[in-house]
Image (cartoon, helix red, strand yellow):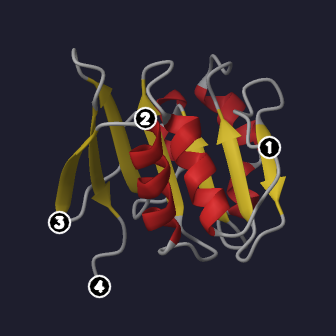
Amino acid sequence: MTEPKASLSNESRLIPSEEAMMALGAELAARARPGVVLLLQGELGAGKTTLARGFLRALGYEGEVRSPTFNLLWLYETEPPVCHADLYRLDRPEQVEDLGLHEYFETHAVLVEWPERNFDAFPEDAIRVRIEVLSDGQRRVSIAGGKTS
C-alpha cells in the first residue's frame, strides 16, 4: 500500500478544544464539493468524528452525527451531499473496494475515517487530515494534499 501524495502546501495547527475541532471541520467544509475526499487519520478518540460533525454542521446538517463504525457509511443530504465512512472494522484492503465507496467520489464530498485500511482505494488528490493527540490533551492537526492546480 502506498500513502496518497501530498501537495506542495502542507499545514499544521494546534487544536485546543472540541469547539476548535468543530471550527476546523467547518473551515474544511468551505472546500466541500462533489469529488472532494478527506482522509481523516488519528487514534481512537482523536477527534475525527468531531471534525466531521463540524464539517456537516457548516453544510447545514442539524441531525445527529455519529461515527459510522458499525454501519460503515452514512449519507447526508446536504449541499453538496456528503458520504461519511469509517473503515475501522475492515481487515483487508479488498473490503474497502467491496464497500463501493468509490461510487461516491464524483457525486459527494467524502469523509473517510481510518483510510489507512487501503490508501490505494482513494484518489491521489485526496486531502489527508492527520490528528495527533498531544500529552496536554490538545491535538496537532496536519493537513496535506488536495488539488494543486
Q: Amino acid at mark 3?
A: Ser
The residue tagged 4 is 149
Q: Which numbered disc, 3 or 2, marks the residue that appears first in the sequence? A: 3
Residues tagged 2 and 4 counted as in contact (Cβ below 8 A): no
The residue tagged 2 is 41
Residue 121 in view (yes/no): no
Q: Residue at x 62, y 23 (%)?
A: 88
Disc 1 vs disc 3: which is toward the camera? 1
User: As displayed, is residue 83 above or below residue 99?
Assistant: below
**Of the pair 26 and 87, the residue shown nearer to us:** 26
**Of the pair 72 and 100, the residue shown nearer to us:** 72
Q: Amino acid at mark 1?
A: Glu
User: As displayed, is residue 16 above or below residue 46?
Assistant: below
Q: Which numbered disc, 4 or 1, marks the residue that appears first in the sequence? A: 1
For the residues labelled 3 and 2, the Cα–Cα distance comes to 18 Å
At which x and y percent is residue 104? 73, 62
| Numbered circle sitting on residue 9 | 3
Identify the element where label 1 is drawn.
loop
Q: Which numbered disc, 2 or 4, marks the residue that appears first in the sequence? A: 2
For the residues labelled 4 and 1, the Cα–Cα distance comes to 35 Å
